[in-house]
Amino acid sequence: MYFWDTDRLAALLANEELGQGQKIRYYIACFYLQTASTVLPMYLFGLSYSLDVITLASYVASLVVFHLGALKVYKACAHYQKAGVLDTVIVLSLPVCIKVHSVYWLVYAVVVYALTAVEGSWYLWVIYSFSAMPIMVWFQFNFIRNAVVRNYG
C-alpha cells in the first residue's frame, strides 16, 4: 500500500493495476485513520469534550463492525462479479445512510423521552451510548450486502 505517494497510486488506478481487494483495504484504512485522528486526540488530550471509556469502547466496537461489514460486502461483490466493491459501497451508502440515520434519530428521540420521563438511571445511557454506533454501522453494511445479494445474482 502507498500511504503517501498519491501520484504513484493514481497511476496504478489509471492503469487498472489495483484489484478490488486492494481497493477495499485502502477504504478500510482510511476509515480507521479518520476515526483514530478524530477520536484519539479528544480522548488523549481532552480537546473537544471528555470521552469516557464507554464511548472509546463504542468507537473500537464500531471499527470492528466496520471492518467485518466491509469485508462481508467485498466477499458478496466478489462472488457475483457484477460491480466493484467500492462502487457498490460508495453509491449505496447514501440511500442506506439516509434510512439508517432516519431511524436512529427517531429511536434517539424515543430513548431521550423515555429515559427523561422515567428518570432513567445512568447505566441505561451507558448501554445506549455504547451500542448505538456499532449497531448503525452493522445495519449499513448489512443493508448494502443484502442489496448486492438481491440484485447482483
Image (cartoon, helix red, strand yellow):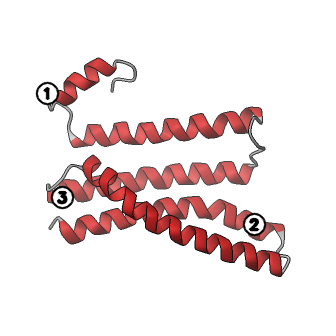
Residue 129 screen position, x and y as percent: 68, 61
- Disc 1 crowd, CA 10 A, few/some/many (<14, 14-19, 20+): few
Question: Looking at this view, is 44 or 87 the one in front?
Answer: 87
Residue 88 screen position, x and y as percent: 27, 54
Which mark is nearer the camera, 2 or 3? 2
- Alpha carbons under labels 3 and 1: distance apart: 24 Å
Horizontal side of 28 relative to 127 (left or right) equals left
Residue 48 to residue 131: above or below: above
Horizontal side of 149 relative to 66 (left or right) equals left
Query: Which of the numbered marks, if any, corresponds to residue 79?
Result: 3
Query: Which of the numbered marks, if any, corresponds to residue 150?
Result: none
- Disc 2 crowd, CA 10 A, few/some/many (<14, 14-19, 20+): some
Question: Looking at this view, is 96 or 142 the one in front?
Answer: 96
Residue 54 screen position, x and y as percent: 71, 54
Query: Which of the numbered marks, if any, corresponds to residue 15?
Result: 1
The first of marks 1 and 2 along the sequence is 1
Q: Residue at x 25, y 64 (%)?
A: 148
Task: Tell me which amino acid carries mark 3.
Answer: His
Q: Residue at x 34, y 18 (%)?
A: 5
The first of marks 3 and 1 along the sequence is 1
Q: Secondary structure at mark 1?
A: loop
The first of marks 2 and 3 along the sequence is 3
Residue 69 screen position, x and y as percent: 40, 56
Q: Residue at x 45, y 64 (%)?
A: 98
Q: Secondary structure at mark 2?
A: helix
Horizontal side of 3 relative to 39 (left or right) equals left
- Alpha carbons under labels 1 and 2: distance apart: 51 Å
Question: Looking at this view, is 98 or 28 the one in front?
Answer: 98
Q: Which residue is mark 2?
A: 125
Q: Secondary structure at mark 3?
A: helix
Q: Quadrant of the N terminus?
A: top left
